[in-house]
Image: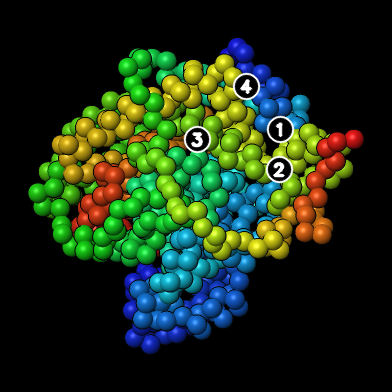
């Protein structure tokens, strides 16, 4: 499959693949993409796309304060936290 | 008969009439797990003490009063780990109950244990679990199917009374078929997904895996219905599903889709499924050949839409708010890249890459948009069919349970395991798999499943047909030999 560049796509997906994975995924996903090219056999020019099985659109509720997770619970699973905050990797030098 | 081999409705009757206490039920279950799970590896963890203390508070007069229900590791149970069988959620403890869990509790059930699955529900064999595969109780050299392979295996091995699973492309029905149990995928939106870790949001549904059809109806009564925490849940009223059970199939029109009896379908599976359909005919159903002309495009459609949605959903695993974080990274990009490289398994990475690609600039129209259009055609196929028939009958899986390791190096071959189940998710309709016999390979009995598909919101017809069939056969009473 031309134009399928695993390394570039992995960068978009924020996954640092190993050279071995890049090689393997290239051939495995190449085969999958060849298979899905089957969809080109159908004329879909007059067909509406379907994102979802049911025509549910916006679901609204009153904008009122209700119970939610407290800060402690929300932070409880963080790999690194302090003083009620998530500690992240340094972004700005 | 052993206590643990009872169905939910049977054990609940004993609890309700005080012939046995919920604590004794849990102790028997704990013993059974200790006896057989080392061979099956269906459970990732379970907390018997905690379950017993919860059992003491339970009102045994409730519909599921005192009955433990095992939970796939993708559904949040407050205070318990929820890991999606992934390293990236290592140590994560759910801070709230999923809506299905609250509903189970309100009905008196005790959410029990975390059962194994393919990582993030991506797979058809449970071999993609970061914690090792589950084995099929009928032949421990084979897979139980997947992704809800743990759910199906523990129910089949009588180390659970029933289990919850999730179904994105067949992940409830296919393992239920391969393990000889009942598995129901409700209509898209019928059951709230609040608290279910998302894989492909336009396809995912939670549903039960049970020992018989009555149990599937009982569990559906409890878990179905609208939920203000899930804006995709349907507002429609939920009937009492047990009312459908005794109606019989006399006069019903069942469609036999000719596209489902093609090359790739194991001849022995075909024979078994055809015999089941003949049986339904003898009970008074009328069987009509129908056509679902876009069936051959379902697999391709699915393997664009599901990975695309997964790539977006799994972007949240960034090593900041929860779960695993890679050590010794330099800078933010390195932090994301290494965390996700080390945290995700092979199949999850493959699907994120595939999904990211089909959504990427320049390819979106060619892949994703086109797949969404074909999706419309697949849905129309079913709508047309349901103008003529009440339900569709076909095989659940093209083959019986396959050997561990047989398909792990060939993703496309693995994907074919779901060829008969994924169209229901694409169309948003409901489906059930019921045991319909066995075939023999290498001297082992391997179960075969009959799939029944119904129009959206018509789970009742599935239960009606499945129950009529089950009452006329004894497949659901056969147990694997585990000692």
Q: Disc 3 marks which residue? A: B306
Q: Is residue B156 left or right of residue B337?
A: left
Check the residue under mark 3 and report the chain it is in. Answer: B
Check the residue under mark 2 and report the chain it is in. Answer: B
In this picture the colour scheme is: rainbow
Q: Disc 2 marks which residue? A: B318
Check the residue under mark 1 and report the chain it is in. Answer: A
Circles 1 and 3 on the same subunit: no
Q: Disc 1 marks which residue? A: A14
CA–CA distance in space, label 4 to label 1: 20 Å
Q: Is residue B67 left or right of residue B394?
A: right
In terms of depth relative to the viewer, which is nearer, B76 or B396?
B76
Q: Residues within 10 Å of mark 2 (few under 14, many from 20)?
A: many
Task: Please state which of the two labelled residues, at mark 4 or mark 1, is closer to the viewer.
Answer: 1
Q: Residues at badges 1 and 2 in contact (C-beta under 8 Å)?
A: yes
CA–CA distance in space, label 1 to label 2: 9 Å
Q: Nearer the N terminus, badge 2 or badge 3?
A: 3
């Amino acid at each position: 499959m031309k134009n399928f560049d695993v390394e570039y796509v992995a960068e978009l997906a924020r996954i640092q693949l190993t050279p071995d994975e890049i090689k393997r995924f290239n051939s495995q996903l190449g085969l999958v993409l060849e298979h899905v090219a089957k969809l080109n056999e159908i004329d879909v020019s007059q067909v509406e796309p379907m994102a979802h099985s049911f025509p549910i659109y916006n679901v609204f509720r009153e904008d009122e304060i209700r119970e939610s997770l407290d800060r402690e619970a929300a932070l409880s699973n963080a790999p690194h936290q302090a003083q009620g905050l998530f500690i992240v990797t340094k972004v700005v030098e | 008969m052993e206590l643990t081999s009872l169905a939910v409705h049977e054990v609940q009757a004993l609890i309700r009439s005080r012939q046995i206490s919920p604590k004794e039920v849990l102790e028997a279950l704990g013993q059974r797990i200790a006896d057989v799970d080392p061979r099956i590896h269906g459970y990732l963890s379970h907390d018997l003490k905690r379950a017993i203390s919860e059992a003491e508070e339970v009102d045994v007069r409730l519909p599921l009063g005192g009955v433990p229900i095992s939970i796939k590791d993708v559904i949040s149970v407050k205070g318990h780990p929820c890991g999606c069988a992934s390293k990236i959620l290592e140590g994560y403890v759910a801070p709230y109950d999923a809506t299905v869990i609250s509903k189970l509790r309100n009905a008196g059930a005790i959410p029990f244990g975390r059962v194994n699955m393919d990582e993030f529900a991506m797979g058809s064999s449970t071999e993609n679990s970061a914690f090792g595969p589950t084995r099929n109780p009928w032949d421990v050299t084979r897979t139980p199917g997947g992704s809800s392979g743990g759910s199906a295996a523990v129910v089949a091995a009588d180390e659970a009374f029933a289990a919850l699973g999730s179904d994105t492309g067949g992940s409830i029905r296919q393992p239920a078929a391969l393990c000889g149990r009942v598995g129901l995928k409700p209509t898209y939106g019928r059951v709230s997904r609040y608290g279910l870790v998302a894989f492909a949001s336009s396809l995912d549904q939670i549903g039960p895996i049970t020992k018989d059809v009555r149990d599937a109806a009982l569990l559906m009564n409890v878990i179905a219905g609208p939920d203000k925490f899930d804006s995709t849940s349907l507002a429609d009223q939920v009937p009492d599903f047990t009312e459908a059970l005794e109606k019989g199939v006399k006069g019903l029109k069942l469609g036999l889709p000719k596209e489902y009896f093609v090359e790739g379908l194991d001849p022995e599976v075909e024979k078994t499924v055809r015999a089941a359909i003949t049986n339904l005919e003898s009970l008074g159903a009328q069987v009509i050949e129908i056509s679902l002309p876009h069936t051959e495009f379902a697999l391709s459609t699915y393997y664009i839409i599901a990975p695309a949605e997964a790539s977006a959903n799994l972007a949240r695993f960034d090593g900041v708010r929860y779960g695993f974080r890679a050590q010794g990274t330099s800078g933010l990009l390195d932090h994301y890249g290494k965390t996700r490289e080390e945290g995700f398994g092979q199949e999850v990475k493959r699907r994120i890459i595939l999904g990211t690609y089909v959504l990427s600039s320049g390819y979106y129209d060619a892949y994703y948009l086109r797949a969404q259009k074909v999706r419309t055609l697949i849905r129309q196929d079913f709508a047309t069919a349901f103008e003529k028939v009440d339900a569709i009958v076909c095989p659940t899986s093209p083959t019986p349970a396959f050997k561990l390791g047989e398909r792990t190096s060939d993703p496309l071959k693995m994907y074919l395991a779901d060829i008969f189940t994924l169209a229901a998710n694409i169309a948003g309709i409901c489906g059930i798999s019921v045991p319909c016999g066995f075939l023999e390979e290498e001297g082992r009995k391997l179960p075969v499943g009959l799939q029944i598909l119904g129009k959206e919101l018509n789970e009742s017809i599935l239960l009606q047909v499945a129950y009529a069939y089950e009452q006329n056969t004894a497949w659901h009473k056969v147990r694997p030999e585990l000692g």
